Image (spheres, rainbow, N blue to C red):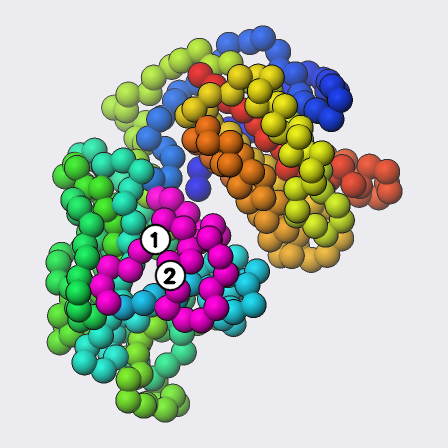
Amino acid sequence: MSFLPQSNFYLNIVNKGNIQFWLFPLLFLGIAINSESQNLILNGSFEEYSSCPNKVGEIDKTINWVSLNSGTPDFFHKNCVFSDSIGSIENGSLGLIVCCDYEDAVEYFGQTLQHPLEKGNYILKFKVKPRAGPFYANNFGVLLRKGQIKLSHWGPYIEEPIFKVDAPLIQTKTWKQFEVEIETQGGEDFIAFGNFSLPEENNLVIDKTQKITVGWQTYLYVDDIVLEKKFSQKGAKAVTQEFTPNKSLSVYFDFDKYELKPNFKDSIDAFIELHNTSVGQTIILKGFTDSDGSEDYNYTLSVNRIEEVKSYLVSSNKKFLFQQHAFGEENPKFSNADKFEKPKNRRVEILFFKP
């Protein structure tokens, strides 16, 4: 995930009714703009969903992702009653069979990109975590192609992926992060994940401590998928534009909560109308908490607060471009030792940028 540079050009705070926003100086800043640096993957963290999953196989409950064959990848979210002890370490994740089920059954998932890719280089990021089992396989891969795949069977789909993991992925306590540079031909508009190799091409590591049963499979959790155009300083067309920072709005939350209160929904509505925000405008969301609780808990709380605000902004149908930065309890603007200042750290800052 990439973010616009943090800036320290706020002047003062203005309060109008329920609206609190920062005024920026009327300066024009020369900024090198890379319009392709946004994540082309929608809901790459699997945090957005239409409803909670109630059982395995409900990939249709998450937003923007689909199964590509008769298989049924599993959707997990820690806010839902049905979850998974490994998959739900993150806010959301998908799980899928990649090898060694009976009759060579495997699963795939994918989505249509926000727009077709250009010819050139892109950066692909994702992370995986194998579930404990008797077999660990290689060949988990990523496919970029023109047009969606839709298969009527549950067997392997064979096509050369843009990237695949050559070594078997062994179960560990932590997620394994991948970041690779890929070269595209141009026009690719669909991304898919799974094992795109023949069954006999799989290299297996066998864990003899695990019981092998009929139908046992190699199973992976996948999360935090990002696809961005690579921006090269050398020879890049860094277009310098006059860029005027717009206003920003801060919304505040109750202790240990991330529900957006009605008065701040009103504030957001009024702010959007007052400042004539437009389709395609970039919005940076920065989430914060106070210092109560663990660092991990507060980081997750700040993520949830960001997602709550983002969800409400999406409902305006303006089609904003979002960039998100969760700080948790880090970088407090107000003193956590002061009982009157501390609540001000429970907030999300909404920064509007418009070239």
What label does residue 65 carry, if any?
Answer: 1
- Is residue 118 among what the camera can see? yes
Neighbourhood count class around disc 2 (C-alpha, 10 Å): few under 14, some 14–19, many 20 upward? many
User: Which of disc 2 and disc 1 is earlier in sequence?
Assistant: 2
Image quadrant in which you'd find residue 80: bottom right
- What residue do we see at 62% from left, 11% from top? 25
Disc 1 and disc 2: Cα gap in Å?
7 Å
Q: What stretch is highlighted in magenta?
A: 41-70
Outermost residue, right side: 339
Residue 130: x, y in percent? 38, 70
Question: Which SS class for mark 2?
Answer: helix
**Above or below for 264 versus 339:** above
Disc 2 residue type (three-letter):
Ile
Q: Nearer the viewer, residue 265 or 285?
A: 265
Image quadrant in which you'd find residue 81: bottom right
Residue 47: x, y in percent? 48, 52
- What residue do we see at 35% from left, 44% from top? 41
Q: Which quadrant: the N terminus?
A: top left
What label does residue 59 carry, if any?
Answer: 2
Image quadrant in which you'd find residue 194: bottom left
Q: Which quadrant: the C terminus?
A: top left
